[in-house]
Amino acid sequence: MPESSNQTQASAARPVVHVAPSTRPVSTQDNGPWENLNASTDQVAVLNQEGTVVFVNDAWRRFAKMATGKDGANGLGSNYLLVCDKSRGDGADDARLVAAAIRDIIYGRRQSFRLDYPCRSATTEDWYSVNVNRSWDYEQTYVVVSHRKKLT
């Protein structure tokens, strides 16, 4: 087969999201190709190949504001992998598992990952599920990380 046919078949075998490669965070006014993720009630962040958070959805922003008490403390522009790697205390082992899975997804060693984990506060312990999936265009891989509170 001609080389272009192989490329077409390979791209047809995986989901494709057409986005412009970017290392800059997407501003709250310019949600770009991930605008539809704002419809999700899951807290969603999109990471580039370096692990930098390039997009967070509205649910992520609301959760971050509730957790920190601050507007704008949503992690946009930070490196998700480094945050996981530097995690200490309760949940640190889970954070490192998530970081390792994200790296595996970035390097193509796996397509997805899921982990249920506890989230403790001073008054309660809730359980969440984190789902990590690969998304790419023809030039760059992106990783979509979503957190969902589990119903008890």
Image: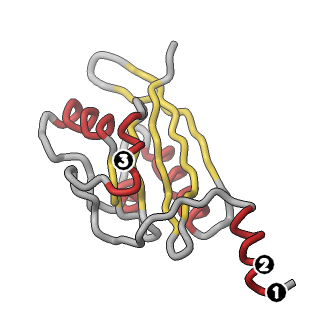
Residue denoted by label 1: 2
Residue 28 vertical placement versus 69 (above, below): below
Residue count near mark 2 (Cα–Cα under 10 Å), binned few <14, some 14–19, many ≥20: few
Residue shown at the point (32%, 34%) measured from the top left: 59
Residue denoted by label 3: 35
| Residues at discs 1 and 3 in contact (Cβ within 8 Å) | no
| Residues at discs 2 and 1 in contact (Cβ within 8 Å) | yes
- Work out whether mark 1 precedes mark 3 in sequence or the reverse, and give the earlier one: 1
Most distant residue in the bottom direction: 2
Residue shown at the point (53%, 59%) measured from the top left: 17
| Side (left or right) of 131 relative to 29 | right
Residue shown at the point (33%, 54%) measured from the top left: 55
Q: Secondary structure at mark 3?
A: helix
Residue 22 vertical placement versus 68 (above, below): below
Q: Which residue occupies the foreground of this view, 110 or 46? A: 46
Q: Which residue occupies the foreground of this view, 122 or 135? A: 135
**Quarter holding residue 69:** top left
Q: Secondary structure at mark 1?
A: loop
Question: In the rendering, at what x and y percent does residue 6 appear?
Answer: 79, 78
Question: In the rendering, at what x and y percent does residue 144 appear?
Answer: 48, 51
Question: In the rendering, at what x and y percent does residue 72 appear?
Answer: 15, 47
Q: Secondary structure at mark 2?
A: helix
Residue denoted by label 2: 5
Please state which amino acid type lies under the numbered disc 2: Ser
Residue 146 vertical placement versus 79 (above, below): above
